[in-house]
Amino acid sequence: MRGAGHWTFHYGMLALFTAFALFPLFWAFKVSVTPNDLLYSEGVRLWPSRVSFAHYGTVLRHSDFPLFFRNSVVVSTGTAVLSTLFAAAGGYAVSRFSFRGKLPIIGLLLVTQMFPLVMIVAPIFRLLAPLGLTNSLTGLIIVYTAFNVPFAVFLMGSFFDGIPKELEEAAMMDGASRFQALLQIILPLTLPGIAATLGFVFTAAWSELLFALMLNSSTAASTFPVGLLAFVSKFSVDFGQMMAAGIMALIPVCIFFFLIQRHLVQGLTAGAVKG
């Protein structure tokens, strides 16, 4: 039987890890509520001597942050939904069917994940510019979807592999078509996988900077990561407003993961085991 010392060490290490992981978030919030006149004059302190939420008001009323925020929500949600739809179809095909060229296609999907994104920004720009998809949220959604689908296909495929084929075969023997068996039996069983895929793609699109910066030059189509650069001037950085914008940008991500957390936890554990 494990003694009290074991549990003390176990929970103590867990508390230290949690504090280490959350400290940057705490420090960002601390800077966001520190008035400008105290930001540098007080030195390093765990909490300011005076608290002010003026940075939040300035960001909301006197900056383009609400526009950037809305753009990020549109792009991330659109990318997550489209990528998950394509990944569900591709993952099901890879898991259930044997067809000519299956292995080369899988290998090609893997190869797409090996190139540094900075190498292909210029070709992507040359492709999108004649189509009028630069400075466009639609263009970002297309690019993000294209780059997230390969990994999402493998993620969804692992969940389909864990569902016995006999379930849909039994449904088809009872008169259901393959599409009906997929829609009514298989997909409900893969809700954890769908949640995991949505969470992964949404987070990746929400925090992406390179394509959002290189494919857009207009404020109207800028997303939140690009918008943070607005708080950096030639000779200074407004850390208070930048941290306030960063804290507010966490809200939709927290809400999104709160809504899918039950399925997400099941998905992250079930997806690691096949059969």
Image: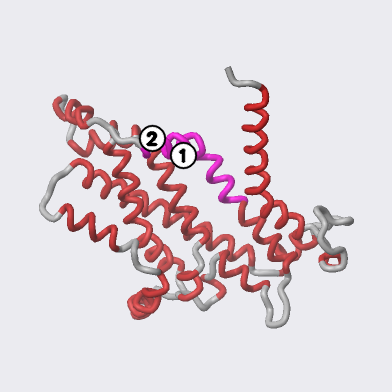
Mark closer to the chain start, 1 or 2: 1
Q: Is residue 225 left or right of residue 23?
A: left
- Disc 1 + disc 2, Cβ < 8 Å: no
Residue in view at x 84 percent, y 56 percent: 48
Which residue is rendered at x = 38% and y = 40% of the image?
A: 193
What residue is at 53 percent from the left and 44 percent from the top? 257
In the foreground, 255 or 151: 151
Amino acid tagged 2: Ala
Packing grade of label 2 (10 A; few <14, some 14-19, many >=20) is: some
Q: Is residue 239 left or right of residue 66?
A: right
Does 266 appear in magenta?
yes
Query: Compared with residue 192, is residue 144 higher up or lower down, i.e. above or below?
Result: below
Q: Which numbered tag is attached to residue 193?
A: none
Identify the residue position indicated by label 2 in the image: 270
User: Residue 72, image x and y in percent?
Assistant: 53, 61
Q: Is residue 125 left or right of residue 274?
A: right
Gap in angstroms between the C-alphas marked 1 and 2: 10 Å
The part of the image, by quadrant, that contains residue 41 is bottom right
Residue 120: x %, y % from top left: 36, 74
